[in-house]
Amino acid sequence: MNGQKFSPIKFQDGMLLILDQTKLPTTTEYLEMHTKEDVWHAIHKLQVRGAPAIGIAAAYGSYISVKGSMEQDYEGFYTEFCMVKDYLDSARPTAVNLSWALSRMEQCVKENKSCTVEEIKGAMLKEAERIKTEEETACLAMGEYGLSLLKSGMGILTHCNAGILATSKYGTALAPLYVGQEQGYAFNVFADETRPLLQGARLTAWELNQSGIPVTLICDNMASMVMKNGWIDAVLVGCDRMAANGDGANKIGTSGVAILAKEYGIPFYMCVPTSTIDFDTPNGEEIKIELRSGDEISQMWYEKEMAPAGIQTYNPAFDVTEAKYITAVITEKGIAYPPYEESLRGLLEK
Ligand code: MRU
């Protein structure tokens, strides 16, 4: 079964383990998470990344951060939990799954107010497990809905990594491909390398390869060419935060791919679990975009500096694809079509 070989997050024998994605594709190494600092660092440095995976890591991370708490009464424990929650929430700003998962953990603590602190800790672990299982179920459902839009033999373009590594199992944007594989479909997948951190090259190409799905790696600036060649029948991407109007923030470069797809008449599908939809954010302009170090552009991956020393850089980690470029939003509750203000809320109420 896909996704079992290299789960990005494992919780076994009371230990939280994170597959260090900064070491892929050459090294498969799990890191032990002991403290809240370990978890914050793992999320901040993208050792664990991808919106749903960040949420799952934070949920377990909040548990392991307070499981050794010496507080005996609820008020003291709740105060300690809130400090951990705010701290972990500060690791990255754009993917809403981080605060969404931590809010669920807080809700769990509050709902168990009348229990002993040890019982609350037990409930927290169960809640983290529930979040992980729910995300896996959602990914499978997105895979089935997504597959209903595809045909065997299609050429698929994807950007960044929205696969098993970004979730827990199946992925979001890659889920239709894995579900299709299980049902005998064949796809020609093209993976944008995804500058500057190369999630497409290091992660998507790696996990599809591991899973036996043929994939062709291209540089980001080749997307137009493969579309023009007629090799792409659909674009599948993930999302880090979708606003109420259907604008979706995803890895930098996604909006360019969407604009190209519209020009070439290719459907552009965003795969978005409902945990990634933020109805409190009315539109994409309100989404906070993470800015990262310019070294990722000028130095990282190169043996020597590839830009003049001290050059000014601009390195936004995400961009917002406007709803008008998104053909459909694939969620675990069904497929939403424009106008998204109505269709997304309609799905949520299902
Ligand atoms: O910076 P990253 O690697 O965390 O960015 C990840 C993405 O942009 C993914 O496409 C997104 O989280 C969707 S993942 C299922």
Image (cartoon, helix red, strand yellow):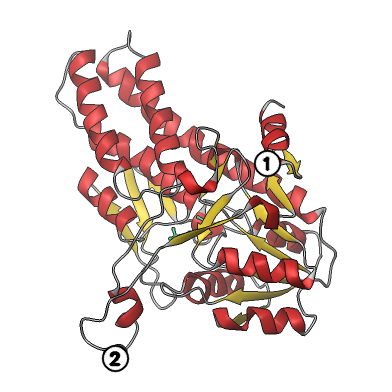
As measured in the structure, the alpha-carbon distance from the residue carrying label 1 to the one carrying label 2 is 43 Å
- Residue 23, position as x, y percentages in the image: 36, 72
Residue at left offset 46%, top offset 42% = 97
Quadrant holding the N terminus:
bottom right
Residue at left offset 21%, top offset 14% = 75
The residue that label 2 is drawn on is 303
- Amino acid, disc 1: Glu
Residue placed most toward the observer, 53 or 191: 191
In the displayed orientation, state which residue is furthest to the left.
70
With 267 as the anchor, is 88 left or right in this view?
A: left
- Residue 284, position as x, y percentages in the image: 53, 48
Instruction: Please determine whether, in this image, residue 170 is positioned above or below residue 227.
Output: above
Disc 1, SS = loop
The residue that label 1 is drawn on is 332
Callout 1: few (<14), some (14-19), or many (20+) C-alpha neighbours within 10 Å?
A: many
Q: Quadrant of residue 315?
A: bottom left
- Amino acid, disc 2: Glu
In this orientation, does residue 67 appear?
Answer: no
Q: Quadrant of residue 257?
A: bottom right
With 142 as the anchor, is 61 left or right in this view?
A: left
Residue placed most toward the observer, 115 or 270: 270
Instruction: Please determine whether, in this image, residue 76 is positioned above or below residue 93.
Output: above
In this orientation, does residue 312 appear?
Answer: yes
- Residue 183, position as x, y percentages in the image: 80, 59
With 115 as the anchor, is 237 left or right in this view?
A: right
Instruction: Please determine whether, in this image, residue 294 is positioned above or below residue 342.
Output: below
Quadrant holding the C terminus:
top right
* Sooner in the amino-acid sequence: mark 1 or mark 2: 2
Residue placed most toward the observer, 108 or 275: 275
- Residue 329, position as x, y percentages in the image: 69, 48
